Image (cartoon, rainbow, N blue to C red):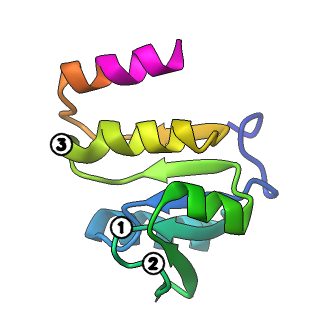
Amino acid sequence: MSILVDKNTKVICQGFTGSQGTFHSEQAIKYGTNMVGGVTPGRGGEKHLELPVFDTVIDAKNKTRCDASVIYVPPPFAADAILEAIDAEINLIVCITEGIPQHDMSKVKRKLE
């Protein structure tokens, strides 16, 4: 994956303050990933893992100039999180959530076409 991500890639996490977002972001930081912040609606302005938290992806992008987003949100919200990252023109979006409804992902696919 070094072609898509390198030490200069600025990464945000959607679902940053949740249990999965926290765990995986901590691991990424320890590994050396250039994490620049995260998104959790309603928690904007806070700090988490010593990084800024934003209410929206577009706010995070405008403030951090991030290149990539990794998404750790529950299945019912995952497609909307992906769509928000697409709308913010994030270059690389990674979502490993299992169980996203197929109908929701068809909306994502249409948006990407």
- Badge 1: residue crowd in 10 Å (few <14, some 14–19, many ≥20): some
Q: Earlier in the sequence, mark 3 or mark 1?
A: 1
Residue 93 coordinates in the image, percent (x, y): 54, 39
Q: What secondary structure is marked by label 3? A: helix
Q: What secondary structure is marked by label 2? A: loop
The residue segment tinted magenta is 106-113
Which amino acid does the dot numbered 2 rest on? Gly
Please report the residue visible at 55 percent of the width from the left and 50 percent of the height from the top: 69
The residue singled out by tag 3 in the image is 76
Residue 104 coordinates in the image, percent (x, y): 25, 26
Q: Residue 106 lies in what quarter of the image?
A: top left
Please report the residue visible at 63 percent of the width from the left and 48 percent of the height from the top: 68
Q: Is residue 103 visible?
A: yes
Is 112 in the magenta?
A: yes
Q: Give above or below for 85 relative to 19.
A: above
Q: Residue 15 lies in what quarter of the image?
A: bottom left
Mostly what secondary structure, the magenta segment? Answer: helix
Q: Is residue 111 left or right of residue 36?
A: left
Residue 99: give its label: none
Please report the residue visible at 33 percent of the width from the left and 21 percent of the height from the top: 107
The residue singled out by tag 2 in the image is 44
Residue 41: give its label: 1
The quadrant of the rendering that contains the N terminus is: top right
Which amino acid does the dot numbered 1 rest on? Pro
Q: Is residue 82 left or right of residue 104?
A: right
Measured in 3D between alpha carbons, the distance from the residue under mark 2 to the one under mark 3, in whole angstroms, is 22 Å
Measured in 3D between alpha carbons, the distance from the residue under mark 3 to the one under mark 1, in whole angstroms, is 15 Å
Q: Is residue 62 left or right of residue 78?
A: right
Which amino acid does the dot numbered 3 rest on? Pro
Tags 1 and 2 in contact by the CB under 8 Å rule? yes
